[in-house]
Image: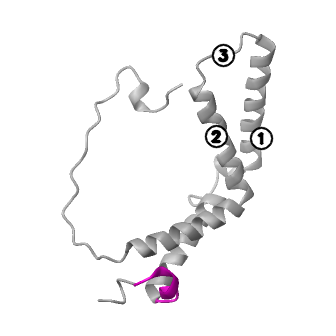
Amino acid sequence: MDLGESSLDNALAFDRIPPAPHQSLRMVNPALISVLSERSKKRVAADKEFVEVEKDIVKYVDRKKRKTVTLNEESLRQERLEEEKKAKNKIEEDPEVVDGPIFPDNDYNNEVLAIAADYVAALRGNSAKTAGSNNAANK
């Protein structure tokens, strides 16, 4: 059960576009990335929605690795019904999926904003002790 363009019959060959020339501002260092990553991991681990998504990912990967399918029609039908029911419930619970704002108030977007706030605080020096040396402050 491969997904993505590469699994299609007429998929385009993979290629890379060379990066555009640009001036590096060097506003991020490995210590800052480490701090931002650790803070994000703590928030994600404490968020029940992200925990559910992680369970879904593990279930998907396990199913993808599976090389056999049960011949018990009832068991297979039950498994499919559970997945369809879960997907339907997810859509019903989140009406913003169909008609909503461009940047909805959800766990993913809130985490993006939290990471951005951590980054801005580090650039301002509010997290200089935890982030290590701040390149913006060293200029």
Q: Looking at this view, is 116 or 98 the one in front?
A: 116
First along the sequence among labels 1 and 2: 2
Q: Which mark is residue 69?
A: 3
Is residue 29 found left or right of 2 in the rendered image? left
First along the sequence among labels 1 and 3: 3
Give the labeled residue for mark 2: 58
Residue 106 visible from this viewpoint: no
Query: Label 1 amino acid?
Result: Asn
Query: Label 3 amino acid?
Result: Val
Whole-angstrom CA distance, mark 1 to mark 2, is 20 Å
Residue at image position (29%, 35%) is 14
Residue at image position (28%, 76%) is 25
Is residue 22 found left or right of 120 in the rendered image? left
**Circle 2 — which element?**
helix
Question: Over which residues does the magenta segment extend?
Answer: 125-133
Image quarter of the C terminus: bottom left
Whole-angstrom CA distance, mark 2 to mark 3, is 18 Å
Badge 2, how many Cα within 10 Å: few under 14, some, many 20+?
Answer: few
| Magenta highlight on residue 126 | yes
**Circle 3 — which element?**
loop
Q: Residue furthest left?
A: 21
- Of badges 1 and 3, the one in the foreground is 3
Task: Residue 59: give x, y in percent of width and height.
Answer: 66, 36
